[in-house]
Amino acid sequence: MNDARGAGWTFLTNHARVLTAVARDPEMRVRDIASACLLTERTVQHILAELEQSGYLSRTRTGRRTTYRVIPGTALRHPADGGRPVAEALGIRADLGTEARAREPAAAYGAAAGPWQPREPSYARERDTAEE
């Protein structure tokens, strides 16, 4: 089924794709991330720099290899996400090492624990406390 109804937008952003690739395999090369995400290497380098600058991942250089680590407690930035941590969005547990995350399916990290439930908007909480 290849129609134009969904043309022009995608479900995940390029930043989410890159962050997910890093969560799956922290030792993945920029070239491999680019290939997996269907992006250019330059775009991936730019996204990795932005994610690191924003506190979503850290970068460790060992010789010629670079290892990336998702910082699981960093809150998502969009107000609709209500401060939800990136680990929850990616379906990973914060207490697992990066090697375990890279080798195991997302269900092992709690992704199967149930769907994410959005938080009630702050104006609704304020309204409910005002009524009491």
Image (cartoon, rainbow, N blue to C red):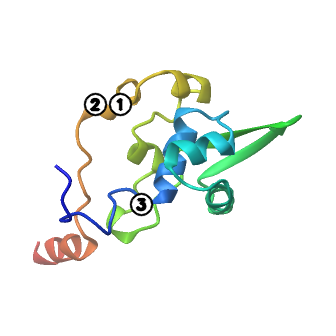
Give the answer, above or below, for where 21 lies relative to 109.
Answer: below
Q: Is residue 73 visible?
A: no
| Farthest-out residue, right | 63
Q: Is residue 19 visible?
A: yes
| Front disc: 3 or 2 | 2
| Farthest-out residue, left | 131
Which residue position holds label 3? 83
Spot occupied by residue 131 in the image (x, y as percentages of width and height) = 10, 76
| Residue closest to the eye, 32 or 85 | 32
Q: Which mark is residue 131?
A: none
Q: Is residue 126 rendered to the left or right of residue 42? A: left
Which residue position holds label 1? 110
Residue type (three-letter) at the residue carrying disc 3: Gly
Q: CA distance from mark 2 to mark 1?
A: 5 Å
Q: CA distance from mark 1 to mark 3?
A: 19 Å
| Residue closest to the eye, 93 or 28 | 28
Give the answer, above or below, for where 15 lies relative to 97.
Answer: below
Give the answer, above or below, for where 39 lies relative to 5.
Answer: above
Which residue position holds label 2? 112
**Quadrant position of residue 61:** top right
Spot occupied by residue 2 in the image (x, y as percentages of width and height) = 20, 53
Residue type (three-letter) at the residue carrying disc 1: Gly
Callout 2–callout 1 Cβ contact below 8 Å: yes
